[in-house]
Image (spheres, rainbow, N blue to C red):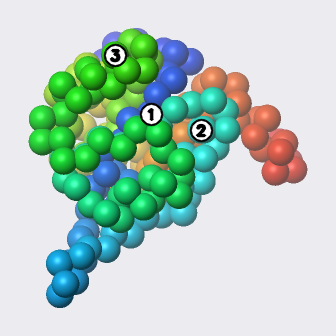
Amino acid sequence: MRQGPVDLKAIELLVLDVDGVLTDGGLIVHSDGSESKRFHTLDGHGIRLWQRAGGKVALLSGRFSAPVSRRAEELEIAYVLQKCHVKLPVLEELLRETGLKAENVAYVGDDLTDIVVMRRVGLAVATANARPEVKKHAHFVTCLEGGRGAIREVAELLLSAQGHWQDLLRKYQVEI
């Protein structure tokens, strides 16, 4: 794993790869050419909790997928960047557009195309199912696999570090 200080309180934007991170990486291709993907509700709720605390979310995927667009719409994700085969220039444009610095970004990835972005951001996260080469560049590796709650795990990590988790629990009347 990558060493060095990480300021979790500085993170404002959570950027997610999709296949293998927000999904388990599997694709179902129907006979008409359309596809299906499976998203985990824990991840969706984690994204919503992060947004309620003021965090921003972006999806950055090498592929285009209509189910991803639909899921992003449901979760009101402002930045949906698909068919980005070279991800770093797209991240740089996103930073310009949002006015954020790289140290304000957490990126979650699982495959080789994610490494270049992970090396640029303030918090690099690899999912439990990530390639070993990717995990070497991560500050944090999730316990859960992509598409199985890994994003919820990251959201809770950030919300706890930023002092929002306890307030969110109170809203749900959870004993703390």
* Mark found first going from the N terminus, 1 or 3: 1
The residue carrying mark 3 is 96
Q: Amino acid at mark 2?
A: Trp
Q: Look at the image and tell me whether residue 63 can be seen.
A: yes
* Mark found first going from the N terminus, 2 or 3: 2
- Please tell me which residue is depicted at 60% across the width and 25% down the height of the picture: 161
Spot occupied by residue 9 in the image (x, y as percentages of width and height): 56, 18
Q: Residue 73 or 9: which is nearer the viewer?
A: 73
Q: Is residue 25 above or below residue 49?
A: below
The residue carrying mark 2 is 50
Left or right relative to 7: residue 160: right
Q: Amino acid at mark 1?
A: Leu
Q: Amino acid at mark 3?
A: Arg
Check contact, mark 2 vs mark 3: CB within 8 A.
no
Q: Is residue 9 above or below residue 148?
A: above
Spot occupied by residue 129 in the image (x, y as percentages of width and height): 28, 53
- Please tell me which residue is depicted at 47% across the width and 39% down the height of the picture: 78
Q: Residue 97 or 169: which is nearer the viewer?
A: 97
- Tell me the element at label 2: helix
The residue carrying mark 1 is 14
Query: Viewer-nearest of labels 1 and 3?
Result: 3
Q: CA distance from mark 2 to mark 1?
A: 9 Å
Q: Look at the image and tell me whether residue 123 can be seen.
A: no
- Please tell me which residue is depicted at 33% across the width and 69% down the height of the picture: 37
Q: Quadrant of the N terminus?
A: top left
- Tell me the element at label 1: strand
Check contact, mark 2 vs mark 1: CB within 8 A.
yes
Q: Tell me if mark 1 has few (under 14), some (14-19) or many (20+) residues whose alpha carbon lies within 10 angstroms of its own.
A: many
Spot occupied by residue 138 in the image (x, y as percentages of width and height): 29, 31
